[in-house]
Amino acid sequence: MSVLSGISPERVFYYFEKIASLPHGSGNTSAVADYLTAFAKEHSLACQKDSYGNVVIFADGTPGYESSSPLILQGHMDMVCVKEDSSTHDFLKDGLRLALDGDDLYAEGTTLGADDGIAVAFMLAILEDDTIPHPPLDCVFTSDEEIGMLGAEQFDPSILRGKTMINLDSEVEGVLTCGCAGGGRADVILPIQRAAVRGIPLVVKIEGLLGGHSGVMIQSGRASANKLMGRFLYELQDVASYSLEAISGGEKDNAIAVMCRAHLIADPEEVSLIESFAADFQAALRMELAGIDDNVLVSVAKGEEKRVQVLDLASQDKAVFLLLHAPHGVRRMHGLLPDTTETSSNLGIVRTTAGEFVISELVRSMFSSGKKALIAELRSLAEFTGARFQRSEDYPEWVYRKDSPLRSTMVRVYEDLFGKTPVLEVTHGGLECGIFYSRIEGIDIVSIGPDLKDIHTASEKMSISSAARTWDYLIRLLAELK
Ligand SMILES: [Zn+2]
């Protein structure tokens, strides 16, 4: 049963509902890809699907636009699958249960997938309609964006005709995104030797921090529990002696660590010194982090004396050295763009196994040189301590263009249509645009989208009226790109 019939723009919501009825979580987009190829066939449009599940549908320019420069429209077809604890939804086979709450469209108990189903719906509604004037179009539907931009990474852009691209994967109406940082993960893997000692086991915990996504919140100054632990352990050496059994903190390389735990072994007479140091450390942090992380907690839990395999002295020194010196936070703000982080790193994960101590960071920069500089620091720390260094998940930046004909047109059309100036933004998070930017020489890209709230959660919502305005804007833009 249709929930959205009668809601305008009708064909956009028709296709949105259609996509929502097909399971399309990341790694499971074949039903949507098949739907897109069938759609192209039905409308006699050229279409290519590659072995990674990316689909491109090509359309000629409408009368008067036959020889205009081709435009790439792009969005991703996969969605993040998150549901409420009580939901019995099966993302592998069930369609979403769409529902309305005033102006908000949501899915009962699950993510809505408006990120990025709305892009798919916009493109299909344009492609089927003979009355919408537009230049030649290359409509690109990528797979598996949400699990590391895998589809875009494997996509061959040489099949595209356009050198101008509108990406439809943004979440704030009235914002034109014009660039993004590149990023990559770096792991420092220190081999450790162990030795047996007897003493009182202590678990030092640093917690109560707010954390957040490192692409969005790194410039907030929110503290990393991992970074604070490095400082704690180094400074503690001046006050008391201890041995280190393990450190573990943080869960994701792209999330600011909210908790870090260090397992220590100490002689009985050192325990009270360590406890009082922890209390002083917490008091100092409460002062430093007031207004940022007001609820930081530093605690020490004591166990019964026992014999434990701890890091030997040399390994402990190196582990503490690495944690103290691993770069974390904003390295530099952008010189030309106000309030925009240029380069940062996040000391996201620390873990210890029987034979290794591992630090994992996510490094981001608007410039490949900025990323390279931070990677060099991490690699040098690894070399100096005899650790292995490993890079992965590297993705390119999309550099802000001083001159962008597409952006100029988009600003002008926005002002004409809405009587106000759009906000130009460069994001510190990663976008597929970076991959297109790095592979299509001279490409001019802007990213837009309607208002979405709480994406990647079961509370995801899309504003119906915002989607309608974004549609009007897109249609006007197509007519202007003659
Ligand atoms: Zn998205």
Image: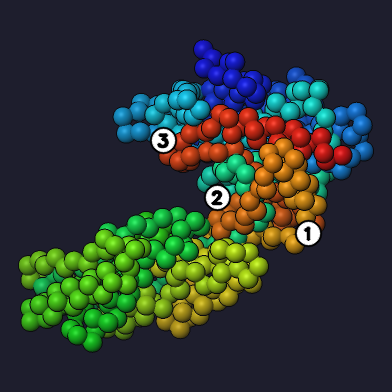
Q: Is residue 478 left or right of residue 169?
A: right
- Horizontal and vertical percent position of residue 82: 42, 37
**Residue carrying label 3:** 458
Question: Could you say whether the residue bearing mark 3 is in a helix, strand or loop?
Answer: loop
Label 2 CB sits under 8 Å from any ligand 1 atom: no
Q: Nearer the viewer, residue 191 or 56?
A: 56
Mark 2 Cα-neighbour bin, 10 Å: few <14, some 14–19, many ≥20: some
At horizontal 42% and vertical 31% (from top left) the residue drawn is 110
Mark 1 Cα-neighbour bin, 10 Å: few <14, some 14–19, many ≥20: few
Q: Nearer the viewer, residue 409 or 155?
A: 409
- Horizontal and vertical percent position of residue 56: 73, 36
Q: Nearer the viewer, residue 81 or 460?
A: 460
Mark 3 Cα-neighbour bin, 10 Å: few <14, some 14–19, many ≥20: many
Amino acid beneath label 3: Ala
Amino acid beneath label 2: Gly
Q: Which mark is residue 148?
A: 2
Residue 454 lies, with reference to residue 37, above or below; the image says below
For marks 3 and 1, the one nearer the N-term is 1
Q: Quadrant of residue 397?
A: bottom right
Mark 2–mark 1 distance (CA, rounded to whole Å): 29 Å
At horizontal 48% and vertical 64% (from top left) the residue drawn is 219
